[in-house]
Image (cartoon, helix red, strand yellow):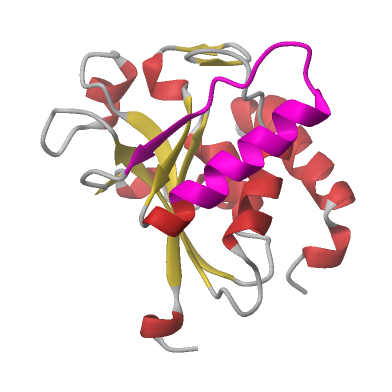
Amino acid sequence: MTQQDSQTATLAGGCFWCLEAVFDNLQGVTDVVSGYTGGTTVNPTYRQVCAGTTGHAEVVQIQFDPDVITYKDLLEVFFSIHDPTTLNRQGADVGEQYRSAIFYHSPEQKQVAEQVIRELSEEKIWKDPIVTEVTPITTFYPAEDYHQEYFANNPEQGYCQMVVSPKVAKFRKKFAARLKS
């Protein structure tokens, strides 16, 4: 696959460490970068984003091969690994930076995202309505180096043990056929 064949998805669903750890394991995903988007501060730092003053969300930017995995498939995984019904919160992580959001890169991605949300809403999987925002991508800022591959590099860290590891285990069980070998 060439770089031209690759597509990009940008998703926010709580802590980027959780999202990165899941999407890194998915067939067809060639790169996952933790970062920030959706805010107003130029080159925000983790400390600024966590303070909740920049408007940014913690996101992962995913490079993927659409011949191996579709954008819709990525969204299926996305909606299975976080709660899209809680506004500005995922578990104990509270604030706008932890919102559920899909930052689309094309009109086609917007259409697919809206279709998936409509289908999931009709299925009534959750008792509360989906509050995931669907918004155009703005400038993406990669997070500091120590956030990249955080779970892979820090599996014994407390948050990784208590939050990331169970999410990854649930994902691996549900999507076993789609895991990288």
**Is residue 63 toward the left or the right of residue 174 in the image?**
left
Q: Work out whether residue 118 or residue 78 is closer to the camera in this orientation and state it.
A: 118
Please name the residue shown 57% across and 59% down the image: 71
Provide residue 43's location: percent of width, then percent of height: 14, 39
Left or right, 110 with reference to 85: left
User: Compared with residue 64, is residue 32 higher up or lower down, i.e. above or below?
Assistant: above
**On screen, residue 70 above or below 148:** below
Give the image location of residue 6, x and y in percent: 45, 76
In the rendering, at what x and y percent does residue 67 appear? 61, 80
Q: Which residue lies furthest to the left in this view?
A: 42
In the foreground, 56 or 48: 56
Residue 142 magenta-highlighted? no
Which residue extends farthest bottom? Answer: 1
The segment highlighted magenta reads 110-136
Q: Is residue 122 left or right of residue 30?
A: right
Who's the residue at 77% across and 19% down the image?
Answer: 126
Q: Does the magenta stretch include residue 132?
A: yes
**What residue sits 53% from the left and 27% below the top?**
132
Residue 170, located in which quarter of the rendered image? top right
Query: Looking at the image, which is closer to me, 149 or 90?
Result: 90
The x and y percentages for residue 97 are: 38, 22
- Of the pair 12 and 129, the residue shown nearer to us: 129
Q: Quadrant of the C terminus?
A: bottom right
Q: Residue at x 35, y 43 (%)?
A: 35
Would you say residue 81 is visible in this rendering? Answer: no
Location of residue 114 (image quadrant): top right
Q: Is residue 80 at least partly visible in the picture?
A: yes
Total marks in image:
0
Determine whether 156 is above or below 141 in the image. above
Q: Quadrant of residue 3?
A: bottom left
